[in-house]
Amino acid sequence: MVTAPPPATVIPQGLLGISIWVMILEHKFALFQPLHRILLELRSLRQDLSAGTVTGGLQKLVPLFQPLYQALVEHNRTEGHWHADETRWLVFERRADKVGFAWNLWVFAAAQSIVFVLDPTRSHHVPEDHFGDHDGIVNVDRYSAYKAMRQVKAGRIILSFCWAHVRRDFLAVLTGWPELTDWAWSWIEEIALLYQRNDARLAALANAALTNAALTNAALTTTANAFTVTAEPAAPSPSTAIMVPAAATLATADRLLREHVDHLAERRDRELAQADLRLPQRKALDSLKTHWAGLTVFLDHPEVPLDNNEAERRERGPVVARKNYYGSGALWSGRLAAMLFSLFQTLNLWCVDLRAWLTAYLTACAEAGGKPPADAAAYLPWNMTKEQRKELTLEPRPSLPNSDSS
């Protein structure tokens, strides 16, 4: 009797097929659902699995994602601009070198990749080891561990502090000291104006970049079509008329932004010199002055945002997961969570269809005998071919019809 070979399984001699593992991984590490809810859903699909079967399988999947995670970390280190933050993550495993179960989940978010690092400490050694010998700019809060990094002390990494945290200082005064409401609110409005003027400069920069690109394309087309040369004087180029308004708008926006930053510094110093300044006011202004160099990095680096909101947004999903399943029951489970949070959020940056990507990668692992494929790094978005990326990219959402249109 001749029969077809059984389908390859991602775990040799395992009971679960690839589609089941895709569902479990997506629900747990992309949708942040606890395992018991996933098992209930599987049971409704006539797949009655025990928690031990799934947990044992997850542990066997860790080596499959390890090479992808390492390649992801190496790419993230080279990007040159990051957002960094950390949050508590529980690991319920007793260790001789660790008191309690409170670990920390660090995030390093860049333009092309997101990396989470699980570590038992909040030490400066974590970001220090992650960045290694690479230079760049890091958006951070005012946590002292970042200031203690050797790369910062050597001037190789520049810290850009967060204006959202500065705003919270004045909000704390606003809500805690009613007699200082007017003063605190005036500073909050000053910070709002700072954001508005920075947004105006960014818009002017984008407009100038589009104008330059359009003029470059027009110049190339004109040069390609200019086969004859005449002695007639050249007509005034329309490009000059186009570039001048764009450049003037950008110069004006940049000047207004810098003037407002100078005004904030002057007001800060003037108020700090007042003898009758209240303690909460002085505390907020002293912090503003101490961190001023890092708070003004964006002036000369327009690509750097005013705040660290990107990192905090990246931590939201893991925080929801922490609330739903209380962290990790073992260290290997915590490592797997950090790996898959990193991979899935990076794929989301590139608009990659997570289910399709997981199916493709786990199929390659199954065909390799339950091991990572030799070209595992080729499954990261920046290493994919155009055809692979097109096949795995999610279709853009259709725009909703205008409700005012008839």
Image: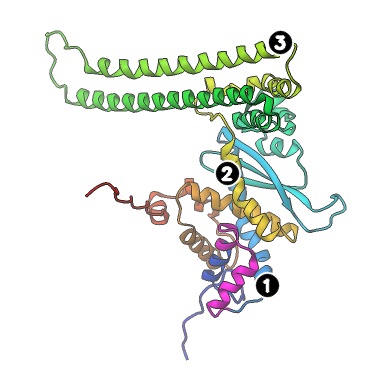
Total labels: the figure holds 3
Residue 60: name its quadrant: bottom right
Write down the region rendered in magenta. Answer: 26-47
- What's the residue at 30%, 49% (across, down)? 403
The picture places residue 47, in percent across and down from the top left corner, at: 57, 78
The picture places residue 51, in percent across and down from the top left corner, at: 67, 72
Q: Which residue is mark 1?
A: 51
The picture places residue 40, in percent across and down from the top left corner, at: 60, 73
Is residue 38 shown in magenta?
yes
Number of other residues with Cα within 10 Å of mark 3, as a class: few under 14, some 14 to 19, many 20 or more:
few
Magenta segment, prevailing SS (helix, strand or loop): helix
Q: Earlier in the sequence, mark 3 or mark 1?
A: 1
Please name whichever residue, 204 or 187, is drawn nearer the observer in this view of the structure: 187
Contact? badges 3 and 2 (CB < 8 Å): no
Q: Which residue is mark 3?
A: 273
Is residue 108 shown in magenta?
no
Element at label 1: helix
Q: Marks 3 and 2: which is nearer the front?
A: 3
Contact? badges 3 and 1 (CB < 8 Å): no
Which residue in the rendered view is the most extreme toward the front? 179
Element at label 2: helix
Q: Earlier in the sequence, mark 3 or mark 2?
A: 3
Q: In the drawing, does residue 41 fall left or right of residue 246?
A: right
The picture places residue 17, in percent across and down from the top left corner, at: 55, 73
Element at label 3: loop
Q: Which residue is mark 2?
A: 313
